[in-house]
Amino acid sequence: MIEEGQLPRSRKPWRGDLPIAAIAELAGVSPPTVSKVLNGRGGVGEQTRRRVEALLRDHGYRRRQTSAATLRIEAVFDRMLPSIAMEILRGVQEVASARDCIVGFTDVHRRLLAGQPWVEPLLLRQPTAVITAFSTVTADHGEQFAASGIPLVAIDPTGDLSPTPAVGSNNWSGALAAARHLLDLGHQRIGLITGPVTDLSARARLDGFRAALDYAGVAFDATLERRGVFTFDDGRDLGAQLLARPDRPTAVVCGNDLQALGVYAAARDAGLRIPDDLSVVGFDDVDQAAWLAPPLTTVRQPFGEIGATAARLALSLADGHPLTQDRYELGTALVVRGSTAPPVTR
């Protein structure tokens, strides 16, 4: 690896007198290529390596007298459901192990609550690449990693991080399949509980739900829609609002499985049976979905493959290979269980 030389006290210890992005521009290469040279990794032509190393030396970096650097991916979470986080990590590990790459795990929840930065500590550790699996990642964060030559891949961010690549599910088609399933069973009055529709995934699920109604010629009833966040409490409270209506829905599509669990509680409190009096569909297919009574019909997200895809993209960027697109969407699958049935005529 290459480390900086003697620098003024005001300069951050992990930089030379130019950021890596500027070194890359001078060398006519990408920041990940500079990062590979900086960390002693292969995959860089000899002439390119010599050119980059000369620039790094000229701007205050020098090579450490150590063996070749170990590849390491840092996976960053913020209090994600353990079952989902473990599936994502399993996918990352499967890809990383084939490259003898170490996988690190970081939960930044406490730092975020305290208003502390989370990017800088990661940059100090100089990982090969970083995968984030929490929603509040921004384009500015992506620029920080790019300037340091460390590839960043985001899983299901709330906004557009372009040019930082993002990996997620096809939320639109998943919600379309959920609503079509209920329509095919004969439901017409279908309630909807969404996540924050300013988020890309929640907005796509809302649009997919409405598209299914449009295709079926069923008018969208805005009074049967409730917008909240992806929590059990919101599912219970917003579900209770829908079920208290004199013209209550015969089915409810939820933004995720936690909301669906909340609707189960609301239905129980209202004296309603699932699926006899109310059909419920979730989204995610967390472990608990199959353990409910009755088991939950839901849309399965391929979290393991999402993690594996993110790892492949991150290591490809670290190898200096540009990506062909900024957004990668994997297919979803409707898992039909016992929480959905044809509506009973009232």
Image: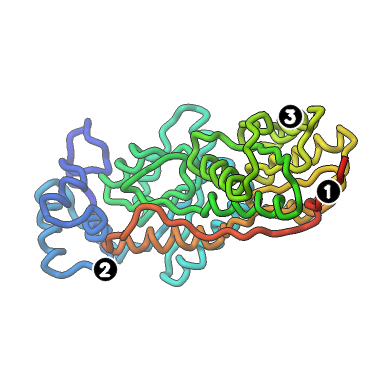
Query: At 16% across and 64% down in the image, what residue appears?
Result: 49
- How far apart marks 2 and 1 lie (CA) works out to 58 Å
Query: At 58% across and 52% down in the image, what residue appears?
Result: 85
Question: How far across and down, in percent of the image, does residue 230 sit?
Answer: 62, 38
Task: Say which quadrant the N terminus sits in.
Answer: bottom left
Position of 257 with respect to 156 (left or right) is right
Position of 101 with respect to 183 (left or right) is left
Q: Is residue 109 above or below residue 299?
A: above
Count residues near mark 3 (Cα–Cα under 10 Å), then give few for <14, some for 14-19, many for 20+.
some
Kindly identify which residue carries mark 3: 237
Colouring used for the render: rainbow
Between disc 2 and disc 1, the foreground one is 1
- In contact (CB < 8 Å): disc 1 and disc 3: no
Residue at the extreme right of the image, as rendered: 271
SS at circle 1: loop
- In contact (CB < 8 Å): disc 2 and disc 3: no
Kindly identify which residue carries mark 1: 275
- In contact (CB < 8 Å): disc 2 and disc 1: no
